Image (cartoon, rainbow, N blue to C red):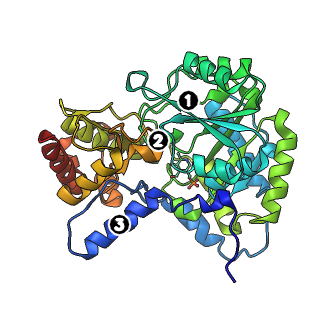
Amino acid sequence: MIPRIKKNILKLKESSTLAINEKSKRLIKEGKKIYQFGFGQSPFQIPNKIIQTLKDNAHRKEYLPIQGLPKLRDKISKYLLSRTGIKYSKENILITPGSKEAMLLMHVTFNGEIILPAPSWVSYEPQAEIGYNKVHWLETLQMNNWFPTAQELEKKIKKIGKNKKLILILNSPNNPSGAICNNLKDLAKVAKKYKLIVLSDEIYTDLSFDNSYKSISEFYPEATCISGGLSKWCGAGGWRLGFLAVPDGLKEFMNSLKSLASESYSTVNTPTQFAAVEAYDGDYKDYKLKVTSILNAVGTFVYNNLKSNKILINPPQGAFYLMPEFKNKKYKNSAKLCDAILSETGVALLPGSDFGFKPNKMLARLSYTDFDGVEFFDNVKDCNSIDDDMVKKYAPNVVEGVFKLSNWAKNL
Ligand SMILES: Cc1ncc(COP(=O)(O)O)c(C=O)c1O
């Protein structure tokens, strides 16, 4: 018997980030040289002490509370307070198997509509669809650093209808643009005026190249939820440890999220939660500085060597992505453009259409993590002296791929 599948689920396709990774692997197997700029994963090792803490706690087999280990929630509460100045008490923090799950729980629980700035991470829209929440795209401009202006946001809200219950999702530093939002205060004003809930996806905020931590919660604490976790700054994506912090005024929302968590994954695995206590309690300033310095150096190399009259690109500000725009009339849409780039140069990119842009916008996401992060990390003695020669030595694939791409673009 064939099971009947719900329409909103049937619409989902495999996340394009995973699909490009699979396609790249296939081509490599066939003997092709591939520059893996499609898949975004931290290339660095998790700090040793955090790994050791995981090992030391591997024997723990008991279930933890649904909401998560109280000590971990307490550390995350302090971590957020130190970065944002806002107190999210440990009662208002939920530990989740990756922040992705936290967002899914939000979508399933929330009954309303979602404003997504384009560009946005690939999973927000499908998750909203799973939760039957209508998505309203808000396209941004390069000259505004790929974030909406307050006026654009207000116009969009008015168009949707002022009385709708809305969540605005903001992600800074941003996947895919690598940009940092510098008008958070203005956006917060509009959010407050129209009583939006904001989901501030801060999974990359510790990877801000100016080493600041900017969060919209500072300006709109009463209705900003923050998601984060170990996947990016700590390089522990596979550990699946994330969190959601909810403001006090949304307690009821938190209670429903908890019920949903208890009926799905029960609780996050115990050893990882103990290891995460170390990650949020220990002093990892030097580790983060080294990681951001390396990423900044590699990203800046990519930026300097791609920008041309054929490729428009903004300088990197955080995370590990850049979003080049190709000036051409040859390809009909960004997916076709990326396909041609992959087959003609071996460079794997993701098309801008996967991030909410209209298909005819010739944008692509470039992830500059195709290098041995452990080797690079071990060879940096002084974070201020990472030059192009070091990038060439320790990130040769990125360098070669970027040259291939810039040469290819000359013929556009
Ligand atoms: C913007 C953004 N948010 C959230 C996530 C999910 O991270 P995780 O579920 O590993 O915490 C990712 C992962 O790629 C991401 O790029």
Q: Nearer the viewer, residue 3 or 269?
A: 3
Q: Secondary structure at mark 2?
A: helix
Q: Secondary structure at mark 3?
A: helix
Q: Residues within 10 Å of mark 1 (few under 14, many from 20)?
A: some
Q: Which residue is mark 2?
A: 207
Is 232 positioned to the left or the right of 85 in the image?
Answer: left
Horizontal and vertical percent for residue 358? 43, 38
Question: As displayed, is residue 382 above or below residue 162?
Answer: below
Residue 395 is tagged as: none
The N terminus sits in image quarter: bottom right
Q: Residues within 10 Å of mark 3 (few under 14, many from 20)?
A: few
Query: Residue drawn 68% across and 52% down?
Result: 104
Asked if the residue at label 3 sits under 8 Å from ligand 1, the reply is no
Q: Which circle's residue, 3 or 1, is located before the other in the chain?
A: 3
Q: Secondary structure at mark 1?
A: loop
Is residue 387 visible in the rendered structure shown here? yes
Dots 3 and 2: beta carbons under 8 Å?
A: no
Q: Which residue is mark 1?
A: 214
Nearer the observer, disc 3 or disc 1?
A: 3
Dots 3 and 1: beta carbons under 8 Å?
A: no
Q: Which residue is mark 3?
A: 23
The kind of residue on which mark 2 rests is Leu
Question: As displayed, is residue 18 above or below residue 326?
Answer: below
Nearer the observer, disc 3 or disc 2?
A: 3
Query: Residue drawn 24% across and 62% down?
Result: 34
Asked if the residue at label 1 sits under 8 Å from ligand 1, the reply is no
Is residue 365 visible in the rendered structure shown here? no
For marks 2 and 1, give the CA distance: 11 Å
Is 242 positioned to the left or the right of 252 in the image?
Answer: left
